[in-house]
Amino acid sequence: MEKRSEKLNEVRVDIEYCNICNSKPQCLELSKLIKERLPEARVACKVGRRGSFEVQINDTLVHSKINSLAFPDYEAVVSNAIAAQEGRSLTKVKEQPITDCVLQ
C-alpha cells in the first residue's frame, strides 16, 4: 500500500503592532497560539505604526486594527493560517469585541 503524502504550503505570519499602545503582549499571545497549532509556521512580531495591529499571512492582509479599531479574533487568525498551509483561500478575520473602552 503506497502512502500518499500531501505537500503543505509554507505559512508566514507577520504581525505589526504599536509599541506606544503597548500591543506587544497581544502580539506574543497570538504568536504563541499560532505556533502551538502550526509549529512549522514562521511568525514575526514587528514594531510598526501608531495604533497598528496588522496581521498578514503570506503577504495577504487578513486584519487591520488601523481600519477596524479592534484586535483580531485569534482563533480566526489561526484558522486562516491553517487554510494557507492547506492552499485554501484566506478570509478577512472577524474582530474581538471591544469591552474595555467607554465613551462619555
Image (tube, rainbow, N blue to C red):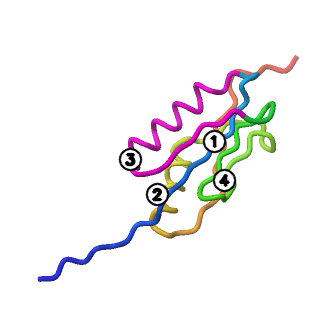
Q: State which region is magenta.
A: 22-47
Residue 93 coordinates in the image, percent (x, y): 64, 51
Q: Is residue 44 magenta?
A: yes
Q: Residues within 10 Å of mark 4 (few under 14, many from 20)?
A: many
Q: Determine the residue positioned at 70% across, 37% down.
A: 53
- 18 in relation to 58, above or below: above
Give the x, y percent position of residue 79. Answer: 50, 53
Mark 4 or mark 2: name the one nearer the start of the chain: 4
* Image quarter of the C terminus: top right
Circle 2 residue: 82
Q: CA distance from mark 2 to mark 3?
A: 11 Å
Q: How many marks?
A: 4
Mark 1 vs 3, N-terminal side: 1
Label located before the other in sequence (1 or 2)? 1
Residue situated furthest bottom in the rendering: 1
Q: Nearer the viewer, mark 3 or mark 4?
A: 3
Residue highlighted by disc 3: 39
Which residue matches tag 4? Answer: 62
The disc labelled 4 sits on which kind of residue? Val
Residue 54 located left or right of residue 50: left
Circle nearer the viewer, 1 or 2: 1
Residues tagged 2 and 3 counted as in contact (Cβ below 8 A): no
